[in-house]
Image (cartoon, helix red, strand yellow):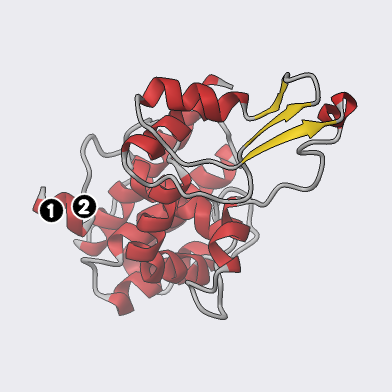
Amino acid sequence: DQNHVNRLAEEMKAGRWKTTHQGIAFDANGTLVDGQQRLWAVFMSGCTVRMAVSRGLSPDSIEDIDSGRGRSVTDRMSISGRFGIERVNRNHAATLREMVRGLNSTGRLTYQQEVDLMTRHVDAVRYANSHLTTMSRGVGTACVRAVIARAWYSVDRERLGRFCRVLSSGKQESGNDTVILKLREQLAAAGCNRNVGVRRELYGMVEWVLTTWLKGETRSVLRPVAQEFFPLPEEVKA
């Protein structure tokens, strides 16, 4: 899996590689039975890393290596207790990825990148997840929560909470809430679309509607934004 190798190599080059009991293994004939991707990542990174080495395994052990249940990203994040007893779940991780991606179609993050970003933005991510808990089709998706997480840094929380409430419930609370209800219809029509281009368009549309609503305006036609309206703190500094 070259993409996995690339991520491992990036971790090594960044100095984030950690030594564990997992490394490389050879059978009794000297044939490599585990660690091909780790070794290829060492070659690609040009780095020297410390790694455990096992020797003398039975030749048929290759069938049983890595056959257990793998830990998910959020399993790994939560098991150390770094995010407290509240922990983080896969919805938090999905929100974070969409939030960082924004209007771009960037590649996958490495695990350590996700940990660093979650540590930095966990309050915003948790806010978005807790305020968009609706099960309505298309409304509580990660790309919608991502906009709320970004807006958490710059928008009045009371107003942002009301936007979430109207979007979640579909119940109008003031005159210009009609633009939120139109957005809700659009999101429901799109559903849980996995196409990256469609998700970016929906993300941009949520930003456009939130900005329009905050200005007290209403529109009959919804459009996605062409540039980021809610930059993250590190993007503002950059």
Q: Label 2 belongs to which residue?
A: 231
Q: Position of residue 144 (x, y in %)?
A: 45, 52
Residue that appears at 47% across and 41% down: 50
Closer to the camera in the image, 172 or 15: 15
Closer to the camera in the image, 78 or 137: 78
Q: Position of residue 154 (x, y in %)?
A: 21, 66
Q: Amino acid at mark 2?
A: Pro
Rendered position, 93 above or below 48:
below
Residue that appears at 33% across and 35% down: 13
Rendered position, 104 above or below 172:
above
Q: Label 1 belongs to which residue?
A: 236
Closer to the camera in the image, 144 or 59: 59
Q: Are marks 2 and 1 in contact (CB under 8 Å)?
A: yes
In this picture, residue 208 sits left or right of residue 24? left
The answer for how far apart the CA atoms under marks 2 and 1 are is: 6 Å
Crowding near the residue tagged with mark 1, few <14, some 14–19, many ≥20 C-alpha atoms within 10 Å:
few
Quadrant of residue 220 within the rendered picture: top left
Crowding near the residue tagged with mark 2, few <14, some 14–19, many ≥20 C-alpha atoms within 10 Å:
some
Residue that appears at 60% across and 67% down: 79
Q: Which structural element holds mark 2?
A: loop
Q: Position of residue 207 (x, y in %)?
A: 31, 49
In this picture, residue 85 sits left or right of residue 96? right
Res 182 visible: no
Closer to the camera in the image, 229 or 108: 108
In this picture, residue 159 sits left or right of residue 29? left
Res 110 visible: yes
Residue that appears at 31% across and 56% down: 210
- N-terminal of the pair, mark 2 or mark 1, is 2
Quadrant of residue 68 within the rendered picture: top right
